[in-house]
């Protein structure tokens, strides 16, 4: 279970699930590169909390929907860390509209940041993982397998993400790099503020979750941490759902 001294990149790490993952890894002795795009203040706050664990925090601004930005992110990691052991593709966005109202711009933006980003991040990360065991974890959502109102573009992008993970897992397993997905149930983060039915969604989810409570960012972070340990060495190309049993009900 020892991850002390390893190096990680967590995208979208300034808040929500990404922040929880970054802090969980830091608590285990991992040096963490924090990627953010818009909110520098929260990224700095997360960095201070990471450094309180006695490890390094590297703040890197960049839009993971842009392949050029991703190249710059990894240039900085190569310069500052010299290697990478863990990649967590968490940054996400998307347009919340019915499918019939989506434009090509809406579709491409959502696909680029939620699915294409993983491909470009992985291509860069593998170069810094050569010669050691590596771990790549993508964060998805139940919209990949369930129809949710106004979630057509995001759900399709998450489904593409999960499919891509399976293909990457097959390609990278011989290189001793594990690639998996953690799919979160309803988590009360800032992302939910964009849902017009947020309060109803939270109440409904809490009521029908067998575990009796909503999934927290820390719940998701614990599973990501497990996948980064040697105990998960034989887990490849899997989607692990963390939702308190919500998705197993009809």
Image: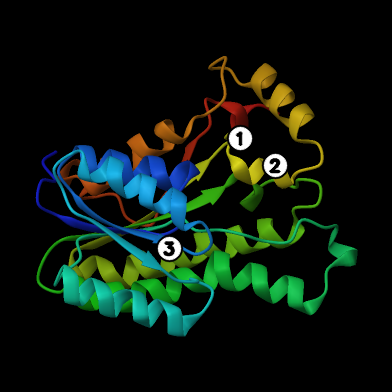
Q: Position of residue 191 (x, y in %)?
A: 62, 46
The correct choice, above or below, for 25 with respect to 31 in the image is above
Q: Position of 3 compared to 20: left or right?
A: left
Mark 3 vs mark 2: in front: 2
Q: Position of residue 2 (x, y in %)?
A: 10, 41
Q: Nearer the viewer, residue 175 or 92?
A: 92
Position of the C terminus by quadrant: top right
Position of the N terminus by quadrant: top left
Binning the other alpha carbons within 10 Å of mark 2 as few (below 14), some (14 to 19) or many (20 upward) gives few
Q: Position of 140 compared to 223: left or right?
A: right
Residue that extends furthest to the right in the rendered view of this protein: 100
Residue at position x 29%, y 39% in the image: 24
Q: Which residue is mark 2?
A: 193
Q: Position of residue 186 (x, y in %)?
A: 61, 35
Q: Which mark is residue 102?
A: none
Q: CA distance from mark 3 to mark 2?
A: 31 Å
Residue that extends furthest to the front in the rendered view of this protein: 41
Q: Nearer the viewer, residue 185 or 166?
A: 185
Looking at the image, is mark 1 or mark 2 earlier in the sequence? 1
Residue at position x 19%, y 61% in the image: 85
Q: Position of residue 39 (x, y in %)?
A: 51, 56
Q: Secondary structure at mark 1?
A: loop
Q: Which residue is mark 1?
A: 186
Mark 3 vs mark 1: in front: 1
Mark 1 vs mark 2: in front: 2
Residue at position x 58%, y 17% in the image: 210
Q: Which mark is residue 166?
A: 3
Q: Position of 97 compared to 119: left or right?
A: right
């Amino acid at each position: 279970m020892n991850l002390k001294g390893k190096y990680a990149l967590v995208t979208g790490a300034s808040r929500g699930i990404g922040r929880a993952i970054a802090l969980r890894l830091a608590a285990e002795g991992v040096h963490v590169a924090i990627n953010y795009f818009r909110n520098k203040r929260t990224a700095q706050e997360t960095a201070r909390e990471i450094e309180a664990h006695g490890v390094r925090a590297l703040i890197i601004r960049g839009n993971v929907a842009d392949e050029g930005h991703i190249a710059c992110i990894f240039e900085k990691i190569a310069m500052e860390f010299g290697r990478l052991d863990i990649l967590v593709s968490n940054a996400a966005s998307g347009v919340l509209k019915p499918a019939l109202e989506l434009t090509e711009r809406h579709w491409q933006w959502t696909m680029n940041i939620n699915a294409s980003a993983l491909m470009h991040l992985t291509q860069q990360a593998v170069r810094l993982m050569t010669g050691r065991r590596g771990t790549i974890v993508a964060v998805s959502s139940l919209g990949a397998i369930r129809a949710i109102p106004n979630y057509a573009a995001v759900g399709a992008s998450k489904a593409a993400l999960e499919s891509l993970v399976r293909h990457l897992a097959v390609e990278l397993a011989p290189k001793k790099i594990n690639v998996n997905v953690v799919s979160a149930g309803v988590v009360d983060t800032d992302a939910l503020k964009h849902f017009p039915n947020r309060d109803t969604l939270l109440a409904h989810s809490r009521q029908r979750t067998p575990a009796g409570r909503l999934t927290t960012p820390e719940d998701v972070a614990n599973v990501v941490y497990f996948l980064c340990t040697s105990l998960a060495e034989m887990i490849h190309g899997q989607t692990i759902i963390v939702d308190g049993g919500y998705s197993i009900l009809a």
